[in-house]
Amino acid sequence: MSRDVELTARARRDINREVGWFVRHRSAEYADRWQTGLEARLDRLADDADSCPEAEEATELGFPLRETIHGRGKTHFRILFVIADKTVRVLRIRNAAQDRLTDADI
């Protein structure tokens, strides 16, 4: 089932923050490749969100939070989202090394 994929304002800020970090600490080319790959992964969520596992903190948060991974090594990121009917709503995009989400993070 194909769904619309929407990003929250926080998810957009997460992307902008990471792109800025990559530009400052790696290169603009690396940042572009990372963002292009991330956007491709977000596009695929329209068709495969149901196959993604529940996030570790879903039970604690009290709602069916799901996740998928983008990247590898030190630069792999958790794309955290919920499915609501015909929409995949991306809540956050966080480096996998960051602490798990809490209510304050959403």
Image: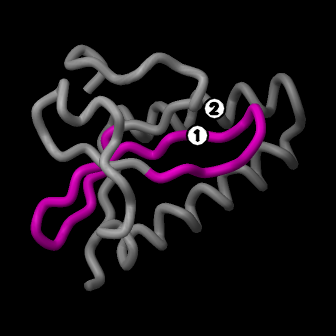
Q: Which mark is residue 18?
A: 2
Name the residue rendered at 36%, 32% in the picture. 10
Q: Main SS type for the magenta part?
A: strand
The span picked out in magenta is 68-91
Q: In which image quadrant can residue 37 be found?
A: bottom right
Nearer the observer, 13 or 3: 3
Q: At label 1, which amino acid type do we have?
A: Phe
The Cα–Cα distance between marks 1 and 2, rounded to whole angstroms, is 10 Å
Residue 41 image offset from top left, x and y in percent: 55, 63
Residue 46 image offset from top left, x and y in percent: 36, 73
Residue 17 drawn above or below residue 63: above
> How many neighbours does mark 1 have within 10 angstroms: few (below 14), some (14-19), or many (20 or more)?
many
Residue 90 is inside the magenta segment: yes
Is 18 situated left or right of 104 in this image? right
Is 86 situated left or right of 31 in this image? left
Which residue matches tag 1?
Answer: 77
Nearer the observer, 22 or 78: 78
